[in-house]
Image (spheres, rainbow, N blue to C red):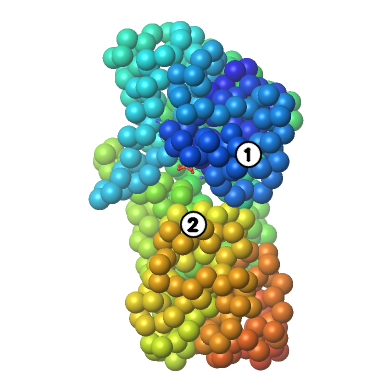
């Protein structure tokens, strides 16, 4: 199949490279000239495990190309995917569809009859209807509009795309169904479940999935708070409930609250959809509040571990990206924490294995260290914010020697208390008995 991908970000580039790897011919389009120039020169705009090799291999096979020009990129495409950003609109949290609709208007000028337009961006219920209306108003006829929301996770994006738990296709006509079936044929043959449904249902399914995962995270975070009050261990509670098949073990890790480019904005957008429909979603609304409060309150844990006053203290922060294996800093829990530490008079030295470049755009008031041990040098406390693998294997005795104050605040429960105390550190985890909260 000949495929055009409008938007070459995390989702567009991964999807485009994987479709090319399935054997399709793909052109990834982006308005950001620097991004396309970089890709044409072999430089990737994002850090994602395995992506560089996958892109290179498919460029060399002649199946993956890049373009700044939408008309050139969509020429002869049988399917045009839209994978542009849908950030939260400032003020009300509604999904901002400006990028989507601008792309559709541009597309309307060049699209050929018979093409299938597919939204891969996360878009509110009814966006497909609106796209159809825009195309009709621009005089475009005989084009199908389908929804194919993306469920990949940054950091494991290629594996997720190639071995998905499911593929959701919302299509209102046979042609769209057939084209998407053909595009995903290699996965179909691998028996990946494909759910064909209505377009509006597919659009809502994506939001329901992300909202549910956000609820699960906030639920275990609240249980962690309770564990600290009643001297129980959230790790064991999570295991104890997660082994129940009806619950499952994933997304039950207590921590500093969820961040990233999806959960925060998608929960807000779902609430806007619910509001417009006049149907309250109390669970999701509360989840958003719980998570916002949690992220804002992480600084208190560091402060308490340091005796209640951060002024003049030096705090080493390990991990800035919103999760491991990505350089994505969007809505990262590190942002409110680091800002609050600095506001309260602490000096921050931070280290992240790959997100430094992105983090430098956000923080201009902290030091960036070359590794975890350099960050710890002469600090009063070390705070683990993102659970990169390399932070799971630190030489804690060496860390203790580097630190001025012997305090480890482990917001990801990477270490055990015994292990940390054995190295001479005071340990403050999340939800791990009474002492954990200091
Ligand atoms: P991104 O910001 O990384 O990339 C979007 C790209 O679209 C940018 O490079 C931008 O320059 C480009 N763009 C915008 N308007 C354009 C236009 N008219 N023509 C060409 N290019 C244009 O965003 P992302 O993280 O890839 O997310 C894209 C969508 O996928 C969002 O709706 C998001 O919610 C959804 N999604 C993201 C993830 C994820 O993990 N990042 C996972 C699933 C779904």
Q: Residue at x 58, y 54 (%)?
A: 326
Percent x, y for residue 414?
A: 64, 72
Figure check: 176 above or below 352: above
Percent x, y for residue 13?
A: 57, 36
Return the residue at label 1. Answer: 42
The answer to whether residue 272 is left or right of residue 210 is left
Q: Residue at x 39, y 40 (%)?
A: 86
Return the residue at label 2. Answer: 358
Of the pair 272 and 160, the residue shown nearer to us: 160
**Classed neighbour count for the residue bearing mark 1: other residues with Cα under 10 Å, few (<14), some (14–19), many (≥20):** some
Of the pair 96 and 195, the residue shown nearer to us: 96
Of callouts 1 and 2, the N-terminal one: 1
Contact between marks 1 and 2 (CB within 8 A): the answer is no
Percent x, y for residue 55?
A: 66, 36
C-alpha gap between disc 1 and disc 2:
20 Å
Of the pair 278 and 267, the residue shown nearer to us: 267
The quarter holding residue 390 reads bottom right
């Amino acid at each position: 199949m000949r495929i055009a991908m409008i938007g070459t970000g995390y989702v567009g580039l991964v999807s485009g490279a994987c479709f090319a790897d399935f054997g399709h011919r793909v052109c990834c389009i982006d308005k950001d000239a620097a991004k396309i120039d970089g890709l044409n020169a072999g430089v990737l705009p994002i850090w994602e495990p395995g992506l560089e090799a996958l892109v290179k291999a498919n460029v060399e096979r002649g199946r993956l190309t890049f373009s700044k020009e939408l008309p050139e990129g969509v020429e002869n495409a049988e399917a045009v995917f839209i994978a542009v950003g849908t950030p939260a609109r400032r003020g009300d949290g509604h999904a901002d569809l400006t990028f989507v609709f601008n792309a559709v208007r541009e597309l309307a000028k060049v699209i050929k009859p018979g093409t299938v337009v597919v939204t891969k961006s996360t878009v509110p219920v009814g966006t497909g209807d609106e796209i159809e209306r825009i195309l009709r108003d621009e005089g475009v006829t005989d084009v199908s509009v389908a929804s194919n929301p993306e469920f990949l996770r940054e950091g494991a994006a290629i594996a997720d795309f190639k071995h998905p738990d499911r593929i959701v296709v919302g299509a209102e006509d046979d042609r769209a169904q057939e084209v998407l079936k053909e595009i995903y044929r290699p996965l179909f043959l691998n028996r990946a479940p494909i759910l064909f449904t209505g377009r509006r249902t597919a659009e809502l399914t994506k939001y329901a999935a992300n909202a549910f995962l956000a609820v699960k995270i906030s639920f275990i975070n609240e249980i962690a708070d309770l564990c600290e009050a009643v001297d129980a261990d959230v790790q064991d509670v999570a295991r104890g409930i997660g082994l129940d098949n009806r619950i499952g073990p994933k997304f039950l890790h207590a921590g500093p609250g969820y961040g990233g480019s999806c959960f925060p904005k998608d929960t807000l957008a779902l609430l806007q959809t619910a509001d417009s429909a006049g149907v309250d979603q109390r669970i999701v609304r509360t989840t958003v509040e719980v998570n916002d409060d949690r992220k804002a309150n992480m600084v208190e844990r560091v402060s308490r571990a340091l005796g209640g006053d951060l002024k003049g203290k030096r705090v080493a922060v390990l991990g800035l990206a919103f999760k491991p294996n990505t350089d994505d800093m969007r809505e990262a829990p590190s942002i409110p924490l680091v800002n609050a530490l600095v506001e309260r008079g602490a000096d921050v030295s931070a280290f992240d294995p790959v997100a430094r470049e992105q983090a430098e755009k956000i923080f201009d008031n902290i030091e960036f260290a070359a590794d975890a041990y350099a960050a710890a040098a002469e600090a009063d406390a070390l705070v683990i914010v993102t659970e990169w693998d390399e932070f799971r294997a630190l030489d804690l005795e060496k860390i203790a020697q580097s630190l001025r104050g012997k305090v480890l605040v482990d917001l990801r429960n990477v270490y055990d208390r015994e292990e940390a105390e054995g190295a001479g550190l005071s340990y403050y985890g999340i939800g791990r008995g009474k002492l954990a909260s200091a």
